[in-house]
Image: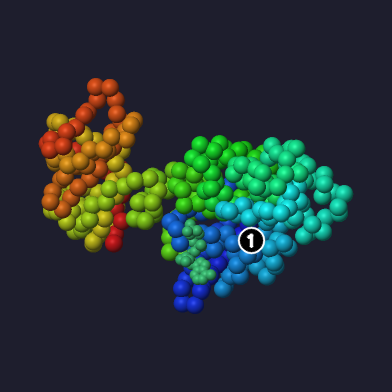
Amino acid sequence: MARLEIQNLVKRYGDFHAVRDVSLSIADGEFLVLLGPSGCGKTTTLRMVAGFIEPTAGHVLLGGQDVTQLPPWKRNAGMVFQSYALFPHLTVAQNVAFGLEMRKIPRADIGKRVEEVLALVRLDGYGGRLPRQLSGGQQQRVALARALAIRPDVLLLDEPLSNLDAKLRQEVRVEIRELQRQLGLTTVMVTHDQEEALTMADRLVVMSEGEVRQVGSQRDLYERPANRFVAGFVGRSTFLDGTIGTPGHFRTSGGLELKCTGDKTGPAVLSLRPERVEIGLVPLEGLDNRLSGTVEFVSYLGSLIDIHVRLSPADRLVVQIANREGGFSPDVGQPVHVGWPLSAGQVFTT
Ligand code: ATP
C-alpha cells in the first residue's frame, strides 16, 4: 500500500483555485518532488498534507489512515520549512525536542532521541547553542533533525535548500538524499529549481496553475513530455507553431513543410530539443527533416554553444552543440544547414 495517498485535493480562496483536484500516490521509501513555477500550488499541496492548511475538498491518507481532519501534531509527518522556522530563543536541543514534547514522548526518551538525531545530521555537540550561533547550513540541519526526531511516516520538505548558497546547496542535496535512503524515508519535496528536482527525485510531479501536468521519472518528462508546458519547463525546447493538414505533415506558420510523428491534425506546435538538432555547413544526409537557414545569434555557454538559426521570417530554432577543439564554430550571418530525425520532434495540438 502507498505510504501517502493524496486524493482529489482542492484548495480554493474565494473564487481562486490554488489547487485543483490533485491526486498522487507516494510509495514507501520514495522521494517525490513537486516541481513547478512560483504560484502553481505546490506549497499549498504540501501544507495540506502536513495539516497546516485545511483543504476545501479531498483527502490525505498516511499509512492507510485518513488524517485530513487531524491537526499537524497528530499526523506523523515531519516538515522542514523554507525559512527553517527554528525557535530563536530555544537551544538546538530544545528545538529538536519540540515535536517530541508535543507528542508527549516520555522525558527520558526525549534526551536520547535528540542526541541520536543530532548525530545523524552531524551536529553532535551543538545541542546547547542557539540558532543564531549557527551557520545557515547548520540551521538547515537542525530543522531537518527536528523533522526526523518524531520518526515520521513521511518527510515533507518545502524548498529546504533555497536559503543556502549555491555550493552548499549542492552538498546538502546529496546529504539529504543519502539520509533519506539510509532511513528509507518516504519524502515529498517542493522546489521550483529544475536541477534540484532532477538530481534528487525518484519521481517528479510537474504542476502549473494548481494542476498536475505530468508525473514521471526524469527520463519520462524529458523524452516524452505530455504537453507543451512540460516540454518547456523540463529541459529546453524550441517551439515552432503551425498546422497539421494530414497526419505526419507539419506546416509551420512561416510555410516550411516538415515531417512529424503522430496521427493528430489541426493547429499544433512542434517541440524540438536543441541538442537533438544537427547543424553543418553542407546539406545533412540521412535525416527526416532537412532545412537551410542563417545563423542569427550565437551564445557561448562554456562547454556548450547555443546557435539560433533563422529558417524563415516566422521560424527560428535553437541548436545546441558541444564546444570542442576544432569543432563547428559558427559566425552570425553564416548560411547553415540543419536537420533532425523524426524522433527528435514532438507535436502537441493546440
Ligand atoms: P512558490 O514557489 O512561490 O512558493 P507555490 O507553487 O508554492 O509557489 P503556493 O504557495 O502553493 O504556490 O500558492 C498557490 C497560489 O495560491 C498562489 O497564486 C498564491 O498567491 C495563492 N495563495 C496562497 N495562499 C493564499 C491565501 N491565504 N489567500 C489567497 N491566495 C493564496
Secondary element under disc 1, as helix, strand or loop, is helix
**Residue type beneath disc 1:** Ala
Q: Residue at x 54, y 48 (%)?
A: 163
Q: Nearer the viewer, residue 194 or 287?
A: 194
Residue drawn at 78 percent across, 42 percent down: 115
From the top left corner, tell me how far across and down residue 101 is, in percent. Answer: 79, 57
Ligand 1 lies under 8 Å from the Cβ of mark 1: no
Circle 1 is placed at which residue position?
Answer: 50
Foreground residue among 100 and 50: 100
Q: Is residue 338 visible?
A: yes
Residue 239 placement (x, y as % from top left): 27, 51
Q: Residue furthest bottom?
A: 14
Image quadrant where one finds the N terminus: bottom right
Point out residue 286 in the picture as x, y percentages from the top left corner. 21, 34
Left or right of 51: which side holds 128? right
Q: Position of residue 318 (x, y in %)?
A: 25, 43
